[in-house]
């Protein structure tokens, strides 16, 4: 009720400012966004973009709910086609897999949660998640590891990209028992796919204005498999003389990331190494809950969290951190050329994190929990109970973020949402 009361107060204050002439000052800030807003309106007229949504397991459905709530508040012209695929909820079958594949092939773009893979062997080595990526040929996984102001970590201002080949390597699902008590697990490395991921990494670096690519390997031990991967990276590097190229052994790379991550820009690596490095690097900037990710084939784009964790122990407790999924959703909008909506959502999420007082049960150990943001009339609250608003989930960022209850909140309101009328923001608060 306190939150509702303050939203009503804010609405009356803004409407009063408009009537008194103060609102005219906000129009100046809005003029710079006119072109982007016009483009966004044109898109809405033409119709919504269809996107396949796969909530996944654990807190995945809660994170997807956060995305849908934020998209609704921001009037994003996207229509989600929701499907369910889960090996732990008895919602997995070849028929369901084909339905998901059909939807993804039709829409070309998807946003997915983590599909949990059970440890037990039940006769099938390839999980549904692996089958999905393999059948869509999602060969390139991209994780952008970037520091977020407001999350205090040992290393600040990090900005590096991890590119992982994810259709072969140790995750080829080729295992067998050659003799009793002897298991052979095949690691597949091909020239074609190694060259493809290397070229993807250098093309990415060129397009994004990056200056260096580091190939991560273990060719000193696996001389043929990783040796081929390294050779392909070296051959491709010669085609990009403006991009600096380095190589690094995987174990040394782990140590260097912890000691001096600033030396890295773009890293490219085989499947298993990428899985490990994704999680290690996510820990450098706050944890699995704050790093977005995406996977690409020649035709399709799939957006997800950068470090894939179901976080099953948090289900139903309303503590799952939606930051990574919201940022990934923002990246998806950019992929759809919805720059205005993408920037609005990403900026709002980052602003809430930056200005809020961040505290959460277990947050020191894992950014899988959301930050609780408190703001009272005198500024940020520390350990005191909330008096004006508690944002229990970042999905509320576009409805009534805590900074709006501070008098200075109106200034920031003018910069991100002056184009929306107060009745659009809070029609139920009048």
Image (cartoon, rainbow, N blue to C red):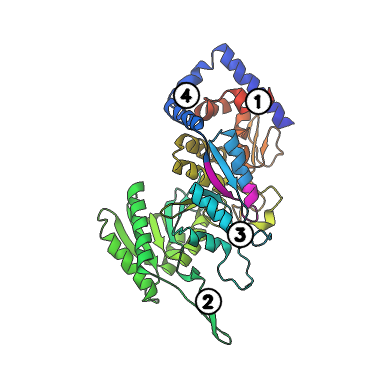
State the residue position of label 4: 30
State the residue position of label 2: 175
Query: Badge 3 local density, few (<14 within 10 Å), some, or many (20+)?
Result: few
State the residue position of label 1: 427
User: Which quarter of the figure has residue 10?
Assistant: top right
Which residues, given as a range, are shown in magenta?
A: 50-63
2 and 4 marks in contact (CB < 8 Å): no
Q: Position of residue 303 (x, y in %)?
A: 51, 50
Q: Position of residue 28 (x, y in %)?
A: 45, 20
Q: CA distance from mark 1 to mark 3?
A: 43 Å
Upstream in sequence: badge 3 or badge 4:
4
Residue drawn at x 52%, y 49% as measured from the top left: 110
Along the viewing direction, whichever of 204 and 39 lies nearer the viewer? 39
Q: CA distance from mark 3 to mark 4?
A: 49 Å
User: Which quarter of the figure has residue 90?
Assistant: bottom right
Q: Nearer the viewer, mark 3 or mark 4?
A: 3
């Amino acid at each position: 009720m306190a939150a509702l009361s303050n939203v009503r107060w804010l609405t009356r204050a803004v409407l009063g400012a408009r009537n008194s002439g103060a609102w005219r000052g906000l129009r100046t800030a809005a003029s710079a966004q006119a072109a982007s807003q016009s483009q966004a309106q044109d898109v809405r007229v033409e119709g919504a973009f269809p996107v396949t949504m796969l909530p996944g397991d654990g807190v995945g459905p809660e994170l997807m709910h956060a995305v849908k709530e934020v998209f609704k508040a921001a009037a994003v012209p996207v229509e989600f086609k929701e499907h369910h695929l889960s090996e732990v909820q008895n919602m997995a079958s070849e028929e369901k897999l084909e339905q998901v594949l059909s939807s993804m092939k039709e829409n070309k773009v998807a946003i997915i949660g983590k599909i949990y893979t059970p440890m037990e062997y039940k006769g099938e080595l390839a999980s549904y998640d692996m089958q999905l990526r393999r059948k869509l040929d999602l060969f390139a996984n991209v994780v952008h590891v970037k520091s977020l102001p407001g999350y205090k970590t040992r290393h600040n201002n990090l900005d590096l990209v991890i590119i992982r080949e994810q259709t072969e390597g140790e995750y080829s699902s080729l295992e067998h028992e050659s003799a009793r008590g002897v298991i052979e697990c095949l690691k597949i490395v091909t020239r074609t796919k190694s060259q493809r991921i290397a070229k993807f990494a250098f093309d990415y670096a060129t397009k994004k204005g990056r200056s260096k690519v580091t190939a991560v390997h273990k060719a000193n031990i696996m001389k043929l498999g990783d040796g081929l991967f390294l050779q392909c990276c070296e051959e491709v590097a010669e085609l990009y003389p403006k991009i600096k190229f380095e190589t690094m052994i995987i174990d040394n790379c782990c140590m260097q990331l912890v000691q001096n991550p600033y030396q890295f820009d773009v890293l490219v690596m085989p499947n298993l190494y990428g899985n490990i490095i994704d999680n290690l690097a996510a820990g450098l900037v706050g944890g699995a809950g704050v790093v977005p990710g995406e996977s690409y084939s020649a035709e399709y784009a799939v957006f997800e969290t950068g470090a894939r964790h179901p976080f099953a122990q948090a289900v139903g407790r309303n503590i799952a951190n939606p930051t990574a999924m919201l940022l990934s959703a923002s990246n998806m909008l950019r992929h759809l050329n919805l720059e205005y909506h993408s920037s609005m959502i990403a900026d709002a999420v980052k602003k809430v994190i930056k200005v809020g007082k961040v505290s959460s049960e277990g947050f020191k150990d894992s950014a899988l929990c959301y930050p609780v943001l408190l703001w009272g009339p005198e500024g940020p609250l520390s350990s005191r109970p909330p008096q004006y608003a508690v944002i229990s989930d970042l999905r509320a960022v576009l409805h009534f973020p805590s900074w709006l209850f501070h008098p200075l909140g109106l200034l920031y309101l003018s910069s991100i949402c002056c184009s929306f009328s107060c009745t659009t923001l809070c029609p139920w608060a009048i």
